[in-house]
Image: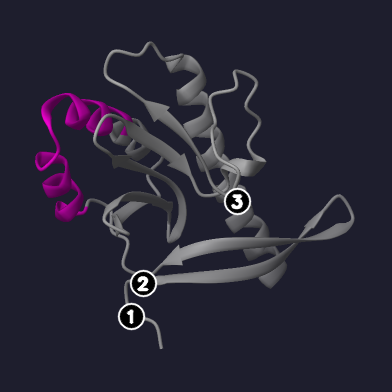
Amino acid sequence: MRPRDGPEIVTATAPAQGESTVSELLRFTGSVRRDRAVDHWMTKRPGELRAIAKRWFEVIRGCGDDVRELLHDGHPTACVKDAAFAYVNAFKAHVNVGFFRGAELADPEGLLEGTGRFMRHVKLRSAQEIDERALRGLIRTAYADIRSRLEAESDGAA
């Protein structure tokens, strides 16, 4: 049995233009509107990395009223309701802004890194210029993608 706030992979079939597709969502029953543990995590990062992580997690938080959050695997994770869509994580010299279904996101500016089946991330360094418009677009797209998957899941259950 998994812990109350642990992840759960949910496989749902959602129709897409007359076809069935499978959508695996990472779900967290313990996500909340604003998690103090996330704010505490931010205070424990070094100055420049904290500023980068905090700035971009605020953008993620601002995607919609249904955004929830928690610490997952030791870093801030954002969900649409209970389905994870994005995270930030700070390392020694950079911050990742990551997307749980990032492999499926359109990335015309080529910001995304990674080779996994689902996840991708954007690596941010303090002295590095970043295409902010493109990163904000990826965040909004990741949010909208998970939100539409949840809506399709609800439509399929009705």
Q: Position of residue 142 (x, y in %)?
A: 54, 40
Q: Position of residue 113 (x, y in %)?
A: 54, 33
What residue did someone put label 3 on?
A: 118
Q: Amino acid at mark 3?
A: Phe
Dot in front, 3 or 2: 3
Residue at x-position 15% and y-position 45%: 39
116 and 63: which one is in front?
116
**In the displayed structure, would residue 143 be above or below residue 125?**
below
Which picture quadrant has residue 12?
bottom right
Query: Does the image show residue 63?
Result: no
| Spatial CA span between label 3 and label 2 | 19 Å
Of marks 3 and 2, which one's residue comes earlier in the chain? 2
What residue did someone put label 1 on?
A: 3
Q: Amino acid at mark 1?
A: Pro
What residue did someone put label 2 on?
A: 6
Quadrant of the drawing holding the N terminus: bottom left
Is the magenta region chiefly helix, strand or loop? Answer: helix
Element under label 1? loop
Residue at x-position 30% and y-position 30%: 94
**In the displayed structure, would residue 119 be above or below residue 111?**
below
